[in-house]
Amino acid sequence: MNSISIRDLSLKFGEATVLDQLNLDVAEGEFLVLLGASGCGKSTLLNCIAGLLDLSEGQIIINGTNVTWAEPKDRGIGMVFQSYALYPQMTVRGNLTFGLKNAKVPREDIEHRVNRAAQMLQIEPLLNRKPGQLSGGQRQRVAIGRALVRDVDVFLFDEPLSNLDAKLRAELRVELKRLHQKLRNTMIYVTHDQVEAMTLADRIAIMRDGVIQQLADPFTIYNQPVNKYVASFIGSPAMNFLDGAYGIDEQPSFTSNNLDIALGRYNFKTRAEDNRPIYLGIRPEHVHVGNAAQEQPFNSDISVEVVEPMGSDTLVWTSLDNQPFHFRMDGQATVNVGDRLPIGFDPVKASLFDKTSELRL
Amino acid sequence: MTVESYEITRAKPSKSSAKEPSGAKPLRRINPTRIMLYSVLLVAAVYYLLPLYVMMMTSLKGLPEIRLGNIFAPPMEVTFAPWAKAWDTACTGLYCEGLKVGFWNSVRITIPSVIMSITIASVNGYALSNWKFKGSEVFFTILIFGSFIPYQVMLYPLVIVTRELGIFGSLQGVIFIHTIFGMPILTLLFRNYFAALPEELFKAARVDGAGFWGIFLKVLVPMSAPIFVVAVILQVTGIWNDFLFGVIFAGVKNFPMTVQLNNIVNTTQGVKEYNVNMAATLLTGAVPLAVYFFSGRFFVRGVAAGAVKG
């Protein structure tokens, strides 16, 4: 059964259409990440699901009930916000119990739920403090706790880790994943951070201008992006795009000025006509260097322009056929500017995009 | 048991010590710019304080001493009789019961007016910033427009309105008028304050199932002390110092302190009792001054700490 179904959802602010005819089904217990650049409508969609924004058109069904016009409290959701949004004048306990008191939950029950949530999030020693006395990480735990005590089926997260520093973010990310594995609730998580999306999600929905570009599991998104936008959004460092044309003499190939890459076993979704302008996208981590390069179906040699050592690996910036190109090397490799290196890759791992529609071939 | 005494020897600060900050320390010098600045400030302060000083001194003198004409001289013989007379027995028109009647009238007018106007305006501001409805912006603009229209223009229509409501010339009448005239500026004040509070707090409270009043009373009001203090100061001073609405809408029995002060000072019969007039004026001005002095420090307090990323 679907936990959440969104049918033809549209949202307009005056003349501006923020979300247009959006459909989305989230399975029970699924961790769905809404990923996109700022202003793509992902938070807006989350607010619609929460009932904090009124829709212009469409329906929202949560757990089989049509909640399109229901109040946020009646939707069976808990929500965690980017800025924590804790009530500053209440203690942590007050923050956790506020919703339960509003819902007239019996006192013993409140006590029990607060203790359970506090234990799960390790915030028991903080229960009598005010939010102002807590660190950022502690505040966000309390905010998660506030959603937890509501005993709901669906959790909504609106960029919950964005305000934390990098180390805390990584810690809480793992903790969230652990929490999901334990509770098995449906979770919808909005972020612009692709690492959070890849690590947490069962499925990722990549959004742009209020439209879902691709909805798939992280591996599919990474390996078979449906269009150039998705390909460039996912992956760090970003995918290389070579500008050229599709050729079909004896076998399919990618050609630009001095390049002729036989596409061999590339898994085509659609066939393009001869000479159609296309992009060939290849991820920096799929480029092989040195001896391994010789074994790849395509190989060439380049001269190193910029070297960025990162410890775990080294990023090398160069150009291939006068087009900017970068790839990843082992962190221990010693490369100097000006070195000539043999490189190679397998076109099976590449992604081809039509130049006008930017859709995957 | 012997009490040992210690000679505390302290190392004399040596100029070459590496731990101490070194280098030439700029001397705090009084330069011409500073002298100019301070003298201008001093002149301005004297200019504004001198009348207060004269009033204070005059109110403590007896009439014969005042007639000597040395208005800046401190009293040779300090007397509090003018203060007592101003409070208790000075004639305000027909009655000779002093300012105390006016004082209590002003209290009876100010307290309910302040409470009512702030209560209504805070709810207005909250609704206009958090529960926007179709046309709420237009409504707000019209309301603000009200604060730019001179009061005098609306006097006659308001007299008719209050007469029709049967509250003209009564305490309720003048409270009603003060509440209405407080609305534009107070609504603006509260709306802007609530609009500046983090929006996610409001959303969180909605998810937590708090309704219109629940969010207002349990979440927003507790973190809005500064703006309430500002509103109270604004309203107490404004309503206490009001003359026009008091004289028109309150009715003779309920004349506020300012109206009675005017009646004392502007009596044309008999001897001008300057000392009593000064004492009466100081008494009337005491309340807003006290309010300002005691609540000024609340102005700067930030209460939203900890609500959002800190």
Image: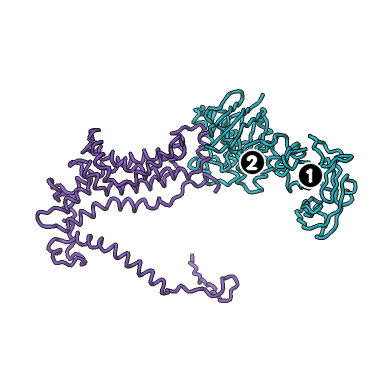
Circle 2 chain: A
The first of marks 1 and 2 along the sequence is: 2
Above or below residue B114? Residue B32 is below
Mark 1 residue type:
Leu
Residue picked out by circle 1: A280
Question: Where is mark 2, residue-wise?
Answer: A191
Provide the secondary structure element on which disc 2 rests.
strand
Helix, strand or loop at label 1? It is strand
Residue A107: mark in rendering: none
Answer yes or no: do the residues labelled 1 and 2 have beta carbons within 8 Å?
Answer: no
Taking the view exactly as shown, the residue that stands out farthest to the bottom is B15
In the figure, the purple chain has which letter? B
Q: Residue at x 68, y 41 (%)?
A: A196
The amino acid at mark 2 is Thr
Asked if residue A278 is positioned above or below residue B68 in the image, the reply reads above
Q: Nearer the viewer, mark 1 or mark 2?
A: 1
